[in-house]
Each structure stands twice: as structure tokens, then as C-alpha cells.
Amino acid sequence: MNTTTSSASKNAANFLNFAIWLVITILSVGVGGYALFLTFTGFQHLGLKNPMLHPFGLETHIAASGFALILGAFQFSKTLRRKAPVVHRWMGRGYVLACVVGGLAGGIIALSSTAGPIAGWGFFMLAILWVPFTLLALRSAMQKDFVAHERWMIRSFALTFGAVTLRFYLPLAIMQNNGEFPLEAYRIIAWAAWVPNLIVAELFIASLRRPRRAKAASTPTPA
């Protein structure tokens, strides 16, 4: 009876994890795909007049973040890791490159935000954490410390996913502001887009079971 209950609980947990991953992946592909659409159409449909929109600023940040969102979501696919490890590794390399490029571009333009220093520092701190978290995930993989690699990847992608949560908050704030760009709310959104993500990631990491230690070989009992 206990075995049946344990199996059912495990199946339910696996289904829940898959459902969460699927929702995150759909949202990531949607937002990332839109970013790539803007990239390949020369940003003609961006609808934003901003002095930061230049090849080494917002354009680069949007393009790289789009790639990072799409590649990063699939890095958490157990099926991909198990059946196509080479694809997983190459997608991981692409993800790291996209995060570093996107993070550096975002950091360069963040403090010049037209929304002021509060919003600017929010996005700048995101970039400051995004790049090293991603590089730590890469280093852990190269050292074959896959437990640490998974945890740093969770942190990194929580920050990458800020592009998605930003696009949830911003339309709501615009609607609340009668269709006008909500400058005051945007200063809060610059932090709210990623800080809660990172908190949830840390809580999830804390809930992961630690790897079991290898049992010491039993010594024979002296006669």
C-alpha cells in the first residue's frame, strides 16, 4: 500500500513539474520568438522611440535575450538531456553566449534609462547577476559538477525569464494608467520583473533533495 501511494505521489509530482516546465517553455518561446521577429524585421515593428535603440544597445539586448529565452527553456528538458546530450551541450553553449551578450548590452544601456536611476539600477543589477550566474553554470558543467550546474542554471534562467514577467506587468500597468506609459510603475517593474523570479528559484533550489552520499562499505565483523 505504501509503495502504491509513493508511486502515485511521484507520478503526480512528475506531472506537475512537466506542466510547469511546459507553461514556462510556451511563454519563453512566445516572448523569445517575438524578440527574434523584431530582430529579423529590423525592429520596424518595435513601436518604441528610444535613444538607446542602437546596434550596441537595446537591439542587441533584445536579439540576444530572445535566443536565451528559447534555448534556456529547453535546457531543462530531461528527455533532451537523456536522449540527445550533444544537442543539450551545444544549446547550452548558445544559451551562455546569448546571456553574456544580452547581459552586457543590457548593462551598458541600463543606467541611461529614460525612466530614471531607480529603473536604471533595477535593470543594471539584473545584468550584473545574469552574466556571472550563467558563467558559473558553465564552469560547473565543465567541472562535471552537475548538481551545482543545475542550480546555477535555475538561477540564470530565473533572470532570463524576467523578459517574460516584464511583459506581464507592463501591459497591466499601462491599462491601469489609461493607456499611457506608466513611468512611476515602470520604476517598480524594473525590479519586480526579476527579483521575485530569483526568490522563487532559490526556494525551488532549497526544495531539491541533496544528492545522497555513497554508503561506506561495511567492514567484516571480526570473528
Image (cartoon, rainbow, N blue to C red):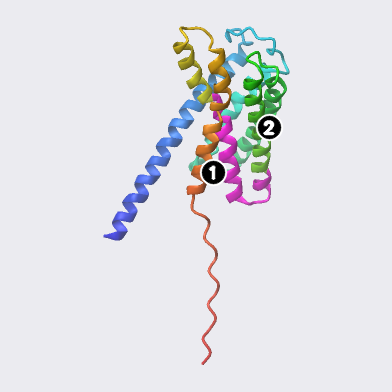
Residue 128: x %, y % from top left: 68, 32
Residue contact at pointers 2 and 1, CB within 8 angstroms: no
Mark 2 or 1, which is nearer the eye? 2
The residue type indicated by label 2 comes to Ile
Which element type, helix, strand or loop, lies under badge 1? helix
- Is residue 52 rendered magenta in the image? no
Towards the viewer: 156 or 146: 156
Instruction: Tally the numbered discs.
Output: 2
- Is residue 146 rendered magenta in the image? yes
**Residue at the limit of the structure toward the bottom, as seen here:** 223
The numbered mark, 2 or 1, whose residue comes first in the sequence reads 1
- Magenta span: helix, strand or loop, mainly? helix
- x 57%, y 26%: residue: 191
| Residue for badge 2 | 128
Towards the viewer: 65 or 210: 210
Residue 43: x %, y % from top left: 62, 11
Few, some or many residues within 10 Å of mark 2 (<14, 14–19, 20+): some
In this rendering, position of residue 41 left or right of residue 30: right
Which element type, helix, strand or loop, lies under badge 2? helix
- x 31%, y 59%: residue: 3
Could you tell me how far apart the alpha carbons at marks 2 and 1 are, in whole angstroms?
29 Å
Residue 98 appears in the picture as rendered: no
Residue 194: x %, y % from top left: 56, 30
Towards the viewer: 180 or 102: 180
The residue type indicated by label 1 comes to Arg
On residue 81, the disc is 1
Specify the quadrant of the image occupied by residue 45. Answer: top right
When the figure is inspected, residue 78 is found, relative to residue 186, above or below; the finding is below
Specify start and end residues of the magenta stretch as a single range. Answer: 139-163
On residue 67, the disc is none
